[in-house]
Image: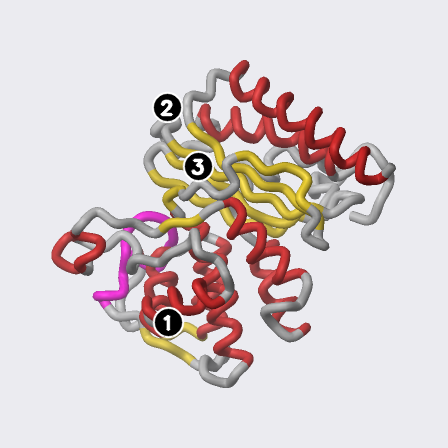
Amino acid sequence: MAGRVAEALVQGGLPAFQERLIGAGFPGQVGLRICTLDGTELVAWHADEVFPAASTIKVPLLILALQQAQAGRLPLHGRVTMSADDRAGGAGVLHELAPGLALTWQDVLTLMIVVSDNTATNMVIEALGVDTVNAWLTAQGLTGTRLVGKLQRPPHLQNGAQRRGERNATTARDQTEVLRALTAGEWLDPEHTALALDILARQQYRDIIGRRVPRDDQGELRYRVASKSGELLGVRHDVGLLWTPRPLVVALLSRSGADPREHPENRDVVALADALWPLLAELGQAGQEGDI
């Protein structure tokens, strides 16, 4: 019976999600995967399609950096100095600050996620190494995800692959597997797992997964969200964990959107969020009482 119920949810929920996107006039392509914490797949739509990773590449970077910290190779409370060459445009705040700032590695990892800081991300990439990151991704079976190089580099500082037009890439399946394994304690010990989840839960950009989550009387989200967004021109992503009564692992990737604005009411973002929440509420059994 349980199997038939899950099947009915998939067959009923995904078409309705697709219809909501069409009704909202969303012109792009979407990759979507939703599963439970034990990995049971509830919805998959273009889940293995490769998309530009945008800032979702920062999720595996966080995991690998914390593995290095756990092994004693990256001291979280040790300090690293930001140089002028580290600074990268786009998201974040560090590029607005003067070089010479000394931050702890935990500060760097936090900024990389909570404000999607590209300078902090490049400092992490420099510490880990592109080849090391890609070897780790391959070893974990995350074959649709690849780090090409640092973010937002001017042409004269790009590597050969970037100059050829290659870009960081990922899939909805890989993103949900990274997050599922994180919650299962497969990547890190309990202390570092808790730190990773805490950092992801403090992300300030909740444009899609967290956008329509109901709020309580104090304005707080009724269900905890730990997530990472990502955006480029025409690209809007959100991947994360949602602790509805039936907790969910979610990855929604999109491209070829029509609204180029970096704005809270970006039409593509609103369409994606409005289409997604009813599906998450259904699959997460959010109409039932549960822990929040």
Residue 12 in which image quadrant: top right
Question: Residues under labels 1 and 2: Cα distance?
Answer: 36 Å
Of the 4 image quadrants, the one containing the N terminus is: top right
Q: Mark 2: which secondary structure?
A: loop
Q: Nearer the viewer, residue 56 or 108?
A: 56
**Residue 101 visible from this viewpoint:** no
First reached walking from the N terminus: tag 1 or tag 2:
1
Q: Nearer the viewer, mark 3 or mark 1?
A: 1
What amino acid type is highlighted by mark number 1? Thr
- Mark earlier in primary sequence (3, 2): 3
SS for tag 3?
A: strand
Magenta residue span: 84-95
Q: Please name the residue that numbered disc 1 is placed on.
A: 132
Counting from the top left corner in percent of width and height, residue 245 is at 80, 44
How many other residues sit within 10 Å of disc 3, few (<14), some (14-19) or many (≥20)? many
Residue 159 in percent (x, y) is at 19, 60
**Is residue 156 on the magenta stretch?**
no
Q: Is 106 above or below relative to 285?
A: below
First of labels 3, 1 by sequence position = 1
Residue on which the image places disc 3:
236
Amino acid bearing label 3: Arg
Q: Is residue 258 above or below residue 61?
A: above
The residue tagged 2 is 258
Name the residue: 62% across, 61% down.
Answer: 181
